[in-house]
Structure formats: C-alpha cells, structure tokens
C-alpha cells in the first residue's frame, strides 16, 4: 500500500453540474440532501459483495450475522 496512489480531486475529469430545483413530494419540505443520491446504491453494493463472498441468497437489508438472518 505504500506505493499505491490514491485518486484525488485533481484526478477528476472536468464535469458539468446542473442544480435542479424540483421539489420531491416524498420528502420533508420537498428537499433532498446533496449527498443522498450517491448513497442510495451503497447498501445494495455491500449486500452484493457479501452475497458473492459467501454464496448465500441475501435478499434483505439489514443483514444479520449467521444464524440470525431471515430470508
């Protein structure tokens, strides 16, 4: 890990950002946090990784330790 170069903001390609102010009917005051959309796929990615590692069909979140997980 000493030779591994971690990406930084300087490695990010130029992107275009558009701020859309469209109210969300399912959230308080019609607002959503700026960081929330990127977090929506994280739990699914974690479950997919665990499913690939252990070979079990995990269909629910939250996951529980072995023996306590209900399918």
Image (cartoon, rainbow, N blue to C red):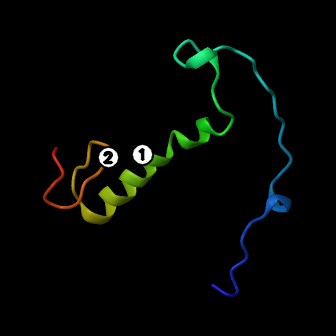
Disc 1 is placed on an element classified as helix
Closer to the camera: disc 1 or disc 2?
2
Q: Which of the 4 image quarters holds residue 7? A: bottom right
Q: Tell which of 15 and 20 is nearer to you.
A: 20
Q: Is 14 left, or right, of 1 in this rendering?
A: right
Residue at image location 42% in from the left, 54% down from the top: 46
Q: Is 43 left, or right, of 5 in this rendering?
A: left
What label does residue 44 carry, if any?
1
Q: Tell which of 63 and 46 is nearer to you.
A: 63
Q: Please, is residue 17 above or below residue 11 in the view?
A: above
Q: Which of the 4 image quarters holds residue 8? A: bottom right
Q: Is 54 left, or right, of 37 in this rendering?
A: left
| Precedes in sequence: disc 1 or disc 2 | 1
* Residue with the mark numbered 2: 62
Q: Furthest residue to the front?
A: 28
Q: Where does residue 26 sit, x and y in percent of width and height? A: 52, 16
């Amino acid at each position: 890990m000493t030779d591994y170069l971690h990406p930084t903001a300087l490695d990010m390609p130029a992107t275009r950002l558009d701020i859309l102010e469209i109210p969300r009917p399912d959230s308080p005051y019609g607002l959503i946090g700026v960081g929330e959309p990127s977090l929506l796929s994280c739990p699914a990615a974690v479950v997919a990784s665990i499913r690939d590692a252990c070979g079990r069909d995990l269909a629910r979140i939250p996951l529980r330790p072995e023996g306590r997980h209900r399918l």
